[in-house]
Image: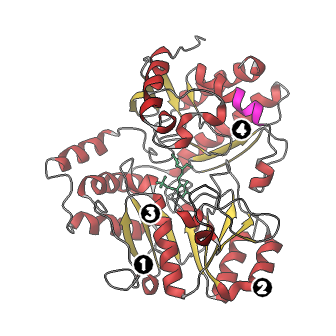
Amino acid sequence: MKKLSFERSESLYAKAVKLMPGGVNSPVRAFKQVDANPIFIERAEGAYMWDADGNKFIDYIGSWGPAILGHAHPEVVEAVTASLKNGFSFGAPSALEIRIAELVQKILPSMEMIRLVSSGTEACMAALRLARGFTGRDKILKFTGCYHGHADMLLVKAGSGVATLGIPGSPGVPAAVVKDTLTLAFNDIQGLKDLFAKEGSEIAAVIVEPIVGNSNFIRPKDGYLELMRELCTQSGAILIFDEVMTGFRVGLTGVQGLKNIKPDLSTLGKVIGGGMPIGAYGGRADIMAKVAPSGPVYQAGTLSGNPVAVTCGIKTLELLSTKYDFTDLAKRTRRLSLGLKERAEKHGIPLSVDYEGGMFGFMFSVKLPESFEEAAQCNITQFKQFFRGMLSYGVYLAPSAYEAGFISFAHSDKDVEDTLNIADYVFANLSQF
Ligand code: KE4
């Protein structure tokens, strides 16, 4: 196997860091969490990406989720190219927005009404403002290790054992803005019961990643989401499933479909835009009716619902819901995940894996973590070595031990076998990376 070199990326990085903070336009891309410098990508097609040095990678990030069909799917490229000739943005309603709303509603019936925005952050921020406006309450509950975008009210320090009122998790976030943001550990069933017993009537909303992809891959304990649903119903708190990552990813119908749980609101992103900037929030019609201009809760966006992005999303969702079968995707995700575990253990390295649909996680630990706090105990040094080893032989994994991985319908069985062969070598020589 030939070890790749990254000279061109290194020189681009030297330029980029003088122009953009960390040389990137989103922090996780900077490879800081794997003690490496980022590689600069020039092209992506199907399951592959090519960098500035001409190196080819099997891509298991897929732009952090959107590229579920594979990059530059020919039918999506054709649809988007045609739409460009009709203009890039109207700033006015178009029938395309009706089409994508109908598609989403057909796939996710809980979304009786929907509002398009341009990112997952906007979707989560707006959904929480709406829940506060609808209930007249101020407190919101999130879970440690769950990420819902970078809106101020959500940037709180990780919670302690008991629900703690928020303290800023980033400079620039005023204490006043997060004082009503409660945090609990994910999967803490007793903690959830105690919190609702104490202050359920003051909680406007609970927002949760129903499978936590921002702590690598953490599955809810049996009954946990069902309890959350019940406690919200009893207390009048709005249950928000943040399916920005899991929507159209762990299965066509997200976790809400897998678990048959109806959230009051859902937030979407990533796949809904097929790689173009679209986020969305939606759910119960009585709640959504409060959104301006039909109601008083204000939210707006110049490029919301723009025809080019919406065309990309429509074609992606149409193909996903008619031409592709998630059971095929899940077989490949399973093969990859169990294959990684087999090869790690063959070389005496503990590895725990989990996967659902086209999303997977692997953690250097004996026991599968059930919370962010447990995920933080995993062997990060081995993760970094594995990441760097795999990258140097052409496999592009998420550059953080707290991110999930994604496989696309374009990944072939051979891609998975090639990946596992490279992993076998890297695990055997882990300390050299
Ligand atoms: P965006 O604003 O990045 O479109 O979406 C925010 C968001 C909301 N909810 C969930 C569950 C998310 O995972 C995200 C964004 N995910 C990260 C990576 N896990 C995006 C990558 C990045 O920040 O560059």
Front position among marks 4 and 3: 3
Q: Secondary structure at mark 2?
A: helix
Ligand 1 lies under 8 Å from the Cβ of mark 3: yes
Q: Which residue is mark 2?
A: 198
Q: Position of residue 4 (x, y in %)?
A: 55, 15
Q: Which residue is mark 4?
A: 338
Q: Amino acid at mark 3?
A: Glu
Q: Marks 4 and 3: CB-CB under 8 Å?
A: no
Left or right, 294 with reference to 128: left
User: In the rendered structure, which segment of residues is drawn in magenta?
Assistant: 380-385
- Which of 52/268 is in front? 52
Which residue is rendered at x = 47% and y = 30% of the image?
17
**Residue 381 painted magenta:** yes
Is tag 4's residue or tag 3's residue first in the polypeptide sequence? 3
Alpha carbons under labels 4 and 2: distance apart: 43 Å
Query: Which disc number belongs to residue 122?
Result: 3
Front position among marks 1 and 4: 1
Q: Which residue is mark 1?
A: 112
Alpha carbons under labels 4 and 3: distance apart: 36 Å
The quarter in which the C terminus is drawn is: top right
